[in-house]
Amino acid sequence: MRAGRAYELLVTRGGRGWRLLAPPDRVDHLEVVEIDSGEVVLFWDCLPADASRMARALRADLAQLEADAFLDRWTAIESVSDLP
């Protein structure tokens, strides 16, 4: 099963403004939620610019990878610097 059918990405911004105008202490939250159970399986707190980059990569992998491969890849990633 494709990861996009098994998981959903939720991005919560720490403020209302654009990331370019965000205060330096703003934190955005990224959650990957299992659709069947509603449980959070992956979670990151990031700076706005990092959250945008990470969200793009997560969405691409949700569309391309199988569910098991997606989890294997993203459980090892702790921050944007770990992205390939």
Image (cartoon, rainbow, N blue to C red):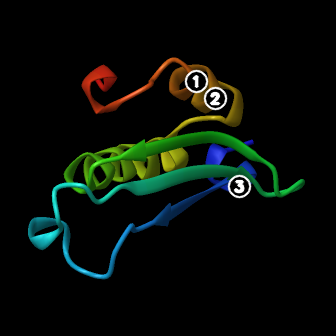
Closest to the camera, between mark 2 and mark 1, is 1
Q: Which residue is mark 2?
A: 71
Lateral position of residue 70 relative to residue 6, left or right: left
Q: Quadrant of residue 37?
A: bottom right
Q: Quadrant of the N terminus?
A: top right
Q: Residue at x 38, y 67 (%)?
A: 14
63 versus 67 height, above or below: below
Q: Residue at x 52, y 22 (%)?
A: 73
Which three-letter amino acid code belongs to the residue tagged 3? Answer: Arg
Q: Which residue is mark 3?
A: 5
Q: Are marks 2 and 1 in contact (CB under 8 Å)?
A: yes
SS for dot 1: helix
SS for dot 3: helix
Closest to the camera, between mark 1 and mark 3, is 1
Lateral position of residue 62 relative to residue 34, left or right: left
Percent across and percent down for residue 81 are: 25, 25
Earlier along the polypeptide chain: callout 3 or callout 2?
3
The disc label shown at residue 75, or none: 1
Percent across and percent down for residue 74 are: 52, 28
Which three-letter amino acid code belongs to the residue tagged 2? Answer: Leu
Q: Residue at x 29, y 32 (%)?
A: 80
